[in-house]
Image: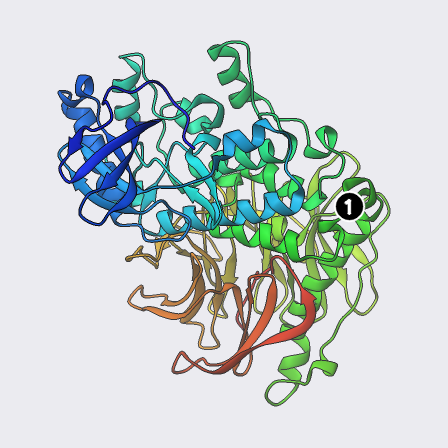
Amino acid sequence: MYSGRSVQLPPGTRLGPYEVIAPLGSGGMGEVYRARDTRLDRSVAVKVLPAELAHRADLRARFEREAKTISSLNHPHICALYDVGDDYLVMELLEGDTLADRIARGPMPTEQLLRIGVEIADALEKAHRCGIVHRDLKPQNVMLTKTGAKLLDFGLAKPNPLGGAENDATMTMALTSEGTIVGTFQYMAPEQLEGGEADARTDIFALGALLYEMATGRRAFDGKSRASLIAAILGTQPPPLAQVRSATPLALDRLVQTCLAKDPDDRWQTAHDVMLGLRFIAESGSAAGVPVPVARRRAWRERAAWFVAAAAVIAAVAVTVTTMEGTPPAGDLVQFAIETPPNLALFPFDTKGLAISPDGTMIAFVAHDLQGKPSLYIRNLATTKITALAGTDDASYPFWSPDSSQLGFFAGQKLHRIDAKGGTRVTLCDAASGRGGTWNRDGVIVFAPTISSELYRISAGGGAPERVTSFEGKHVRHRWPWFLPDGKRFLYGAGNDLVAGSLDGKLHEEIATNTSNVVFVPPDRIVFSRGAVLMSQRFDPDTLAISGQAVPLPFGNVAYMSSSSSAS
C-alpha cells in the first residue's frame, strides 16, 4: 500500500490506454493511482504530475528526469518503469507495506534488517554505478513486497556530479527560496542541509539513518522544530544502537555510525561497501553477529584477531612467498599474533592500515594510547619489541620505502615520511584524506591524496605532486596503489575494479573486477578480498594478464585487507 495526501483524478479517468481505478497516495513529485492497462489487462501504478504543478518548467523538467532515471535502471530491487505519457509515468504495481509502515510496528529482527538492508544497498549501488544519486531515500520510499524490498520515487534523483551534473547548491538555493528543500529533513546528510554537492555518499548517510531506524524503531535524528532537527544532524551523533536496543550486533553499530559520519570522506564510500558489510554481519560467526553484551567481552580480543588476520596476509605476501618458487602451499603461510602493548589499543586495520617492511623484519601499525591519540608504532618480528615513532600523531595508512629504512604516512591532511628508527618527520605535500601509497626504488611515491581522487606521484625528497591517473568511464575513486617489480607500473583500486597504471600516465588497463585492496605477490600472484573472503590468483606482471581460477586463502573470512606497499 502507498500512503500520501489526497488525490484529484476520479475513478474511470483515462490516461492514454490506462484507466484509473483508485488513488494510492502521493510520491515526492506526483500523485499515484492504481490503474488498469486496457491493452495488456494488467494492474499498474500511474504517477501523475498534478495540474497545478505542470505549468512550472522546473518541476516538469524534474518529472521528466525521473522518467529518464528509472528507465535507465533495471534491477530487482528498483521499481520498474513500464511507460511514459504526457505528464504521467506508468510503473509496476507493488503490493505490500512501505518500510515506514513496518517501522511503525517496532524495531526489526536483526536477520530481517540485514536482508532488507542488503537489498536497499544493492539497489543504490546499481543507481550509483549508472551515475544517479537518489537524494530522497527514506522509509516511505521503500516498499516491502513478497519478492523483497523495492526502491521507489526517483523524483529528486540527479546525475552524479562526477558526470558533470548541474550544481546542486544552486538548485537547492532556488528551491529553498520558495519554501521547499530538496530531500526530507530527517534523512538528509549535512552537506545537503548546507547546500553542498550531493553524491553517492549522501545516499549512504540516508541509508545509515534508515538502518538505525529499522534497528531501534526510532529516528537517528529528531527535533521539536526544523531548526533543532537541522542542528541535530549537523552537530550530534545518535545514541549507539546498543544503548537503544541491547541485542544489536556490535559490527552493525559500527557500520551504521560510519554511514552517519558528518564528513562524507569519513563514511563508507560506496553502497557496495555497505552491502558487503551487511552481508558479512549476516554470515559471520564471530562477535559481529552476537548481541553487544557478549560482543563487548570479546571486543579487544576480536580487534586483535583482525589485526592478526591482516598481518598474516601481508606477512605471507612479503616474507613467505618471496622465499619460495611459485605459490606456497597453505600450510607454509606464516601466521603470528601481536600482543597488544600495555596502555595501547590497536585500531581495526581497515580504518588506519598497517604495512610490513620489504625485508620482512618489521610491521608498522597505528595504535592509540589511553587519551585516544593515534600514532605509528613499529614491531620487530624477530625480537617482538614495539617502538613508538614520535611525531606521527594522527597517522594513518603507512607504507615502506623499498630498503625498509623509511615510512610514508598520512596525518593532519598531509603526506609525510619519517625514518623508521625515529627522527623528524618530513612533510611532502597536501593529502586531505589519504588512502594508500607505494614507494619505488627510484624514490618515487605514488599515492591517493583523498578518498575519492585520482592518483598522484611525488619525489620522496619533496616537490610538486603530478597526477598519474585520470577518471575514465566507471573508473573513479582511485586508491591503494601497489608498484609492480619494474617500478614504473602499478596496480590500484578503482571502485571495485583492479586497474594498472604507469608513472607516465599513459597506461590505464582494467585487470579484474569485483576485487578490493589488491596486493602483488612476487613472482606471479595477486592477493585480494572478494566480499569477505581473501583470494589469490595467478598474475603475470609483465603482460598484466590474469590466468587460472581465484582460490580462497586459508585465513577465514575478513572484512577488509590493508594494502600499504612499496616496490623493491
Please state the horizontal and vertical placement of residue 464, each as a whole percent of the image: 38, 50
Q: Quadrant of residue 356?
A: bottom right
The 10 Å Cα crowd at callout 1, few under 14, some 14 to 19, many 20 or more, is some
Q: Which of the two residues, 512 or 42, is positioned nearer the viewer here?
A: 42
Q: Quadrant of residue 497?
A: bottom left
In the image, what residue occupies the spot 46% across and 39% down?
96
Asked if one can make out residue 270 in the rendered structure from this viewpoint, the answer is no
Q: Which of the two residues, 5 or 260, is positioned nearer the viewer here?
A: 5
Q: Quadrant of the C terminus?
A: bottom right
Question: Does residue 183 sit above or below 180 in this rendering?
Answer: below
Q: Quadrant of the N terminus?
A: top left
Inspect the image, locate mark 1, and give the three-letter code of the amino acid beneath it. Ala
Question: Does residue 254 sit above or below 118 in this rendering?
Answer: above
Q: Which of the two residues, 388 or 168, is positioned nearer the viewer here?
A: 168
Question: Does residue 372 sit above or below 317 in this rendering?
Answer: above
Please state the horizontal and vertical placement of residue 470, each as a whole percent of the image: 31, 56
Please state the horizontal and vertical placement of residue 353, each as a whole percent of the image: 62, 54
Asked if one can make out residue 191 in the rendered structure from this viewpoint, the answer is yes
Please state the horizontal and vertical placement of residue 442, each as a whole percent of the image: 46, 69
Question: Does residue 356 sit above or below 422 in this rendering?
Answer: below
**Residue highlighted by disc 1:** 345
In the image, what residue occupies the spot 83% across and 44% down?
294
